[in-house]
Image (cartoon, rainbow, N blue to C red):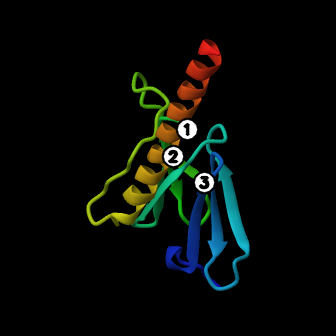
Amino acid sequence: MNMKPADLVFIGIKGSVVALNRSTGEQVWAMHLKGSDFVNVVVQDGVILASCRGEVFCLDALTGNGLWHNPLKGFGLGLATIATEGSVESGNALLMAEKRRRDEAAAAAASASVVAASG
């Protein structure tokens, strides 16, 4: 059976992109990108665009093979959004939720260190 990108579901997790068979849930391929950080994933025109640790990767949707990579030098390691013509807005909602979680964790850690220093 010849698979098409529409037959797959793409998951960004811990520095990797994983492709699952949409019908069975079976893993078709996995590609480690970088580190073990949050991965933002967009699918368009048979390719996967993924951002992780401040870098952008383009993968073939059927094989996971890397097509290109841009380290975005000089921009740091923060979360990066991906926008393409016709891309779905829901990915940005997930990314904003992750940013909010990170901001809250950083604020809690800073508050805890202030309390510890004053005690």
Q: Residue furthest right?
A: 26
Q: Nearer the viewer, residue 94 or 88?
A: 94
Of residues 20 and 108, the one drawn nearer to the viewer in this rendering: 108
Q: Amino acid at mark 3?
A: Asn
- Left or right: residue 58 compared with residue 62: left
Q: Secondary structure at mark 2?
A: helix
Residue type at mark 1: give it: Ala
Residue for badge 3: 65
Report, in whole angstroms, how far the alpha carbon at label 3 lies from the one at label 2: 31 Å
In this view, the residue in front, 97 or 50, is: 97
Q: Position of residue 6 (x, y in %)?
A: 50, 78
For disc 1, the neighbor class at 10 Å (few under 14, some 14 to 19, many from 20) is: few
Q: Which mark is residue 101?
A: 2
- What is the distance, in whole Å, between disc 1 and disc 2 at their CAs? 6 Å
Name above or below for residue 87 compared with residue 81. below
Picture coordinates of residue 86 (x, y %)? 28, 66
